[in-house]
Amino acid sequence: MDIQITTKKSEGVERLLEVSVPLATVNAEEEKTARRYASSVRLPGFRPGKAPPAMVRKRFKDAIRQQVLETLVQEAFKEVMEREKLDVAAQPHVHDVKFDEGQPLTFELHLEVRPKLELARTEGFRIARVETPVTDDTVAEQIETMRDQKATWAPVEEQPREGDMVKVLLATPETSGGEMPEGSPYNIVLGGGQAIPGVEELIMELAPGETKERVVKWPDDFPDEAQRAQTKNVRVTLQEVKRKTSPALDDAFAREVGDFDGIDALRAAIRVDLDEQARREADALVRQQLVDEIAQANPFAVPPSWVNRMIDAYMQAYKIPDEQRQTFAAEFATVAERQVRRDMIIDAIAEQQQLTATEKDVDDRVAKVAEQRGTDPGQVYTSLQKAGRLPEIERSITEDKVFEWLIARNEITSGANA
């Protein structure tokens, strides 16, 4: 196809090309499309396919022009891809189409090309592997969290204190000096940041069934800027106080939370779990540091469309409401770009070093999972296949092989957080 291609922008992975289709090509395609219409359309007074071409072109002018436009843009796009040898990273966009009668067809093609990562340097980096040690205090904190999850709430006839759950009627006028409305019910855990300090102080002065009213100042850092540092008349009625009671830390508690002989066995199991978690976190940090070092030593552009795709995936996973999507996208853009860059580096190394997971690798991993579950590998494979989990396993194996290759070629020092 005889077209003219002019590069208007070439920065990183972005390309902006101006494409011009000659008038002769436009006329030829228009003539061909008109003949096709004439051979099939029906016009009053003429047998099918026998209407005069001139009449057909006049009657179906807009439809013919639209078909010509779509055909020529598609063919011109294919020609651009072949001639420019472009490996696009995402669906290109057509802009600024000009298709006036008696003039060439012109349009702009905005696209992103897939970057080619050479990764000249992947070795010689020094990474500190820092693993946070598990202490008795860490184990005790985990057990306290478990006790808190098993805690019960019981009503008390006392003034509330920090940590208590209260049921209150809270009222404040809409305007300064306005009429005090009826109170709205709230359940608040005192000390949890659910109410501003002035309101909590007022609640803790009450006994169940009492009501008190006074002026309270809103904090200077209140989320709603319009209410910051304002003073308002507040009325609180304390309806109920509940106090939390955690179970005793004894062998009975250990047996309640799991299959443990006693509290010492529970502590030992928690320590093993925390040690394993610390190991995984340290390994993950080493991996990320390796990727960051490689990215810094081998700069490359990242297709913006890939970053946007990553942001959209996280939005769906986190179920971000429509009204918060723009803010989330702006805040998450750096994280998304880092993740895309990480994936691109892993893919490049896997391809260059032939480390991509094979079918045998996947079968071996499935067999290992089946052994751990005490079930048949075929059943596990079918289950994972139905759940769409096999690509995830394949990706995990590829990443493991890539980082094993990298760790063997870089210096990883040992250390621990105090």
Image (cartoon, rainbow, N blue to C red):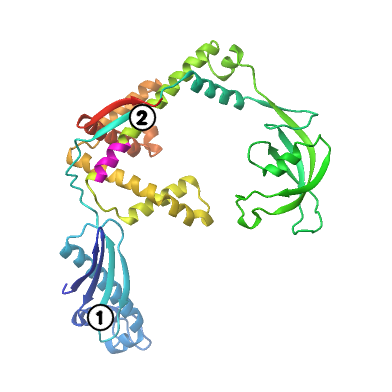
Instruction: Give the residue type at disc 2.
Output: Ala
For label 1, the crowd category at 10 Å Cα-Cα, with few meaning under 14, some 14 to 19 and many 20 or more, is many
Could you tell me which secondary element the residue under label 1 belongs to? helix
Q: Residue at x 66, y 55 (%)?
A: 227
Q: Residue at x 60, y 27 (%)?
A: 149
* Residues drawn in magenta: 288-296
Vertical arrangement, residue 99 with respect to residue 299, above or below: below
What is the x, y in percent for residue 344? Answer: 27, 46
Q: Is residue 180 left or right of residue 405?
A: right
What is the x, y in percent for residue 326? Answer: 47, 57
Which mark, by number, is residue 282?
A: 2
Marks 2 and 1 in Cβ contact (< 8 Å): no
Q: Quadrant of residue 407?
A: top left
Q: Is residue 255 left or right of residue 325?
A: right
Q: Is residue 340 left or right of residue 225?
A: left
Instruction: Give the residue type at disc 1.
Output: Glu
Q: Quadrant of residue 1?
A: bottom left
Q: Is residue 395 visible?
A: no
For label 2, the crowd category at 10 Å Cα-Cα, with few meaning under 14, some 14 to 19 and many 20 or more, is some
Q: Which residue is mark 1?
A: 30
